Amino acid sequence: MEQALESVFDTVVARNPGEVEFHQAVREVFESMGPVIKRHPEFLEWKMLERICEPERQIIFRVPWTDDKGEVQVNRGFRVEFNSALGPYKGGLRFHPSVYLGVIKFLGFEQIFKNSLTGLPIGGAKGGSDFDPHGRSDGEVMRFCQSFMTELYRHLGEYTDVPAGDIGVGGREIGFLFGQYKRITNRYEAGVLTGKGLDWGGSLVRKEATGYGTVWFAEEMLRTRGDSFDGKTATVSGSGNVAIYAIEKAQELGAKVIGFSDSSGYVVDEAGVDLDLLKQVKEVERGRVKDYVERRSSARLGTSGNIWDVPAQVAIPSATQNELNGDDAETLIKNGVVCVAEGANMPTTPEGIEAFKKAGVLFGPAKAANAGGVATSALEMQQNASRDSWDFEYTEKRLKEIMVNIHELVAETAESYGMPGDYVAGANIAGFEKVANAMHAFGVV
Ligand code: NDP
């Protein structure tokens, strides 16, 4: 990293102690910024990097609620409104026991650049809680969501801050959150949350968007080498919202997906994933991966290592941060992987990214590859604002165009900075320049 950038980075670490995931996300962006500050030294003079690393606002709040046994539980809620240069704050809510300020800040920071790449008018934010929905009844999840929104609502608005889902927050949670927002404010403000149900302001394709978008991004990367998904083997980590629809689209494009996972383990299914069964187990029954294996004779549970030990030509990490490390990358490379597209946020460690780069593997970073989810959220906001709803084909077409455009922008930016094929640098630079220019236009803000 350049000396000038290193010194800003040191300040960021000192000002945000212990937030290791946030430091990792900032470092990854700064490592791409050397050529940018050479071409645009004014960004340093304007203190653009210092400004962009400091959230505009951070909200931390108590979330008290009562469980089914009548016991009071206390969780912590977060919303980091990171940057509103391009539009209202936009980014998901994560409910997972690992959530703390450092996780929300890394996600919010990444979101700024991702949202910029979509070309749509949305700023960057993220929020969530250390609440764990696993094993909780619908009533408990509802009471938690109501308590969470009872504080958060005052910070939201369709022109201010528009949350969506993320890990642990799907259609059920968005329903409880929207219901409470509507009740407190006495306003049917559909555009205040995205990922809503189709009967009450949601958008077709939102559920599928992140997974489909990631696969389309990978398809574009493969196309640059005259290649495609057709006939390829693939593994997808996770089995949540992103993973399921990445599997669906990869299969549609002719790939054979032979592995997936959750936090309890991984599955190898050499016959190819039975998607209907997977949806039944995960979306309907909220079960574990072993429930899939019990009903599918061609499938087995992995007994050692992790999903990246399963040989595949395409890998789509779609579970969580830092789930694919340097050793995993070496294993994938040894087994012939040609393309990796990040469905999850920051799933690959810096060592993993370096290994893929060295081996010449096509690598699509999350900021670009998984931007389809937030892009379709922005399309949901457009539909809400015009009190309209678009059909599946039209919405899917819009999403696909957006993903193709992101690929083109990222590839061209990398090329113009002399780093052809480096999608990490291309995404960081293209995302950053637009936000920095907007911030400069607003004066010292
Ligand atoms: P879900 O909650 O629907 O699914 C998450 C999946 O990942 C589950 O299978 C879960 O297993 C697994 N998982 C979560 N944490 C861990 C862990 N620590 N170790 C192993 N497995 C884990 O979330 P999403 O699919 O929505 O999100 C997945 C990733 O995609 C996240 O990084 C998210 O930030 C990112 N993303 C999501 C978008 C969206 O539109 N939903 C948009 C852009 C990015 P288990 O159930 O056992 O915990």
Image (cartoon, rainbow, N blue to C red):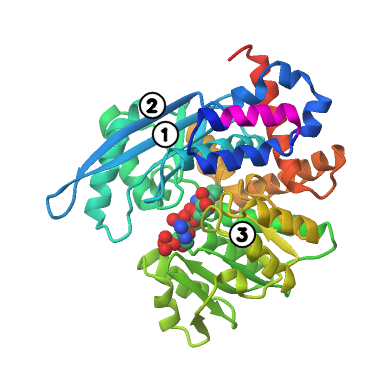
Inspect the image, locate mark 2, and give the three-letter code of the amino acid beneath it: His
| Farthest residue, direction left | 70
Q: Is residue 192 above or below residue 47?
A: below
Mark 3 secondary-structure assignment: loop
- 5 magenta-colored: yes
Residue 201 appears left or right of 136 = right
Mark 1 to mark 3 CA distance (whole Å):
29 Å
Q: Is residue 205 visible?
A: no
| Magenta-drawn stretch contains 131 | no
Residue 39 image offset from top left, x and y in percent: 83, 26
Q: Which residue is mark 1?
A: 79
Task: Answer yes or no: disc 3 within 8 Å of ligand 1.
Answer: no
Quadrant where the N terminus is found in the figure = top right
Q: Are marks 1 and 3 in contact (CB under 8 Å)?
A: no
CA gap, disc 3 and disc 2: 37 Å
Tag of residue 386: none
The residue stretch that appears in magenta: 2-12
Q: Residue at x 48, y 36 (%)?
A: 384
The x and y percentages for residue 172 are: 35, 52
Residue 265, percent from left and from top: 46, 71
Q: Amino acid at mark 1?
A: Arg
**Is residue 2 at all visible to an observer of this figure?**
yes
What residue sits 30% from the left and 38% below the top? 148
Name the residue beneath numbered marker 2: 155
Q: Please state which amino acid type lies under the numbered disc 3.
A: Asn
> Which of labels 2 and 1 is toward the front?
1
Q: Are marks 2 and 1 in contact (CB under 8 Å)?
A: yes
Helix, strand or loop at disc 2?
A: helix
Q: Ligand 1 near label 2 (Cβ, under 8 Å)?
A: no
Residue ID for mark 3: 325
Q: Residue furthest top?
A: 443
Query: Marks 1 and 3: which is nearer the front?
Result: 3
